[in-house]
Image (spheres, rainbow, N blue to C red):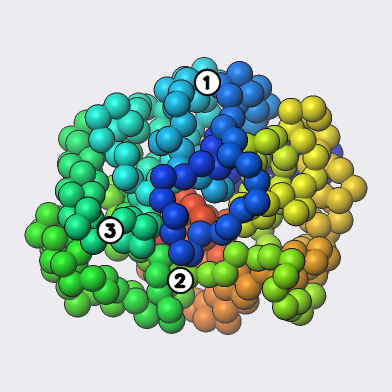
């Protein structure tokens, strides 16, 4: 910690904003296609090694499309910086699958809802078999790897696997009946499958944009206290939902990260969140913060087996990446 600068739970790094799918729920972006070079990533990793518990390869884009993902992971490994990869899973075969099994990769999150939304129906069955084959390899070769299969399509507090064929295939593969599964995402998001492999449920949300109606100034966020993001062009943003860099705090290619994170704008944002105020216009158009107040309102006293590292008050993993689930108890 330097001055008032905290140690972060995670930092989202967008190694590419190029994606191989066009999902209806993903944020549209006016930014030109861009990929982070390995030397640029290496420079960031060297600065982040003492600032964060892990880096998450995620904002926009599909990280497995990066032409030198091996070099990216090697740069992280060189400074001992654990990596969490968020992928739609379409390319999760052959060489990319091998890379995901490297020791420096702490967690892989596969967004099943992305493929269901972005792939033709005829291709989804083949895609699912590819994902399940990776699950089997991970269980065999990397039982310490945290693996989440995401279904983030809930329209209300209760959700399950809406696709009957998907529910039947997952039930068959993992040896448990998931067809009538109902999850209250306000209380518990993860459902254990085997070992460190989980289904992860959550609600759909609207990405904040300046052309949306402005909401109440009251509200808080874990941006700049628990996490922040770095876009492929080097701009540093307070949160991974700022997909176009509206709240850019500076550019990590030209200014040290510690200096950017202690800038006047960053301190103003952090101070506002600390007292429950959204000082920036984009933040006042973000509906995601409503989850934090709902979770406080629905929180119960913790009993046996609850809360040790529960998701509780909407920690930053809900902003697009859930943290490693060290055992089923922490998956709240």
Seen from the viewer's position, the closer of residues 296 and 190 is 190
Q: Position of residue 214 (x, y in %)?
A: 76, 76
Q: Which mark is residue 75?
A: 1
Residue depicted at 65% across the width and 28% down the height: 44
Q: Nearer the viewer, mark 3 or mark 1?
A: 3
Seen from the viewer's position, the closer of residues 210 and 108 is 210
Tell me if label 1 and label 2 are in contact, CB under 8 Å.
no
Rounded to the nearest angstrom, the CA distance separating label 3 from label 1 is: 36 Å
Label 2 or label 3, whichever comes before in sequence order? 3
Residue depicted at 49% across the width and 52% down the height: 321
Location of mark 3 (residue): 120
Q: In the rendered view, would you say 137 is above or below 310? A: above
Label 1 or label 2, whichever comes before in sequence order? 1
Location of mark 2 (residue): 203
Q: Is residue 108 visible?
A: yes
Tell me if label 2 and label 3 are in contact, CB under 8 Å.
no
Q: Position of residue 47 (x, y in %)?
A: 68, 27
State which quarter of the image contains the N terminus: top right
Q: In the rendered view, would you say 185 is above or below 86? A: below
The residue carrying pointer 2 sits among few (fewer than 14), some (14 to 19) or many (20 or more) residues within 10 Å by Cα, namely some
Seen from the viewer's position, the closer of residues 118 and 73 is 118
Q: Could you say whether the residue bearing mark 3 is in a helix, strand or loop?
A: loop
Rounded to the nearest angstrom, the CA distance separating label 2 from label 3 is: 23 Å
Q: Position of residue 307 (x, y in %)?
A: 46, 63
Tell me if label 3 and label 1 are in contact, CB under 8 Å.
no
Residue depicted at 81% across the width and 57% down the height: 269
Rounded to the nearest angstrom, the CA distance separating label 1 from label 2 is: 34 Å
Seen from the viewer's position, the closer of residues 171 and 186 is 171
Q: Nearer the viewer, mark 2 or mark 3?
A: 3
State which quarter of the image contains the C terminus: bottom left
| Image quadrant assignment for residue 184 | bottom left
Q: In the rendered view, would you say 253 is above or below 23? A: above
């Amino acid at each position: 910690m330097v001055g008032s600068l905290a140690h972060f739970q995670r930092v989202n790094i967008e190694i590419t904003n190029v994606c191989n799918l066009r999902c209806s729920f993903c944020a549209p972006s006016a930014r030109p296609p861009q990929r982070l070079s390995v030397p640029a990533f290496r420079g960031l990793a060297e600065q982040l090694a003492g600032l964060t518990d892990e880096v998450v390869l995620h904002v926009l884009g599909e990280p497995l499309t990066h032409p030198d993902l091996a070099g990216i992971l090697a740069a992280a490994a060189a400074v001992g910086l654990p990596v969490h990869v968020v992928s739609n899973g379409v390319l999760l075969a052959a060489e990319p699958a091998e890379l995901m099994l490297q020791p420096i990769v702490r967690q892989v999150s596969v967004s099943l809802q992305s493929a269901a939304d972005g792939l033709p129906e005829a291709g989804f069955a083949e895609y699912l078999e590819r994902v399940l084959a990776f699950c089997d390899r991970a269980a065999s070769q990397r039982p310490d790897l945290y693996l989440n299969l995401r279904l983030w399509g809930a329209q209300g507090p209760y959700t399950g696997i809406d696709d009957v064929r998907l529910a039947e295939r997952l039930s068959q593969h993992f040896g448990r009946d998931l067809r009538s599964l109902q999850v209250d995402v306000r209380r518990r998001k993860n459902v254990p499958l085997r070992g460190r492999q989980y289904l992860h449920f959550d609600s759909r949300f609207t990405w904040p944009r300046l052309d949306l109606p402005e909401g109440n100034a009251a509200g808080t966020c874990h941006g700049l206290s628990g996490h922040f993001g770095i876009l492929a062009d080097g701009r540093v943003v307070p949160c991974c939902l700022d997909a176009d860099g509206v709240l850019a705090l500076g550019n990590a290619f030209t200014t040290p990260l510690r200096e950017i994170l202690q800038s006047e704008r960053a301190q103003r944002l952090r101070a506002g969140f600390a007292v429950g105020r959204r000082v920036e216009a984009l933040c006042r158009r973000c509906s995601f913060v409503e989850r934090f107040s709902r979770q406080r309102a629905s929180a119960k006293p913790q009993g046996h087996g609850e809360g040790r590292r529960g998701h509780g008050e909407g920690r930053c993993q809900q902003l697009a990446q859930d943290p490693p689930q060290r055992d089923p108890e922490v998956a709240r």
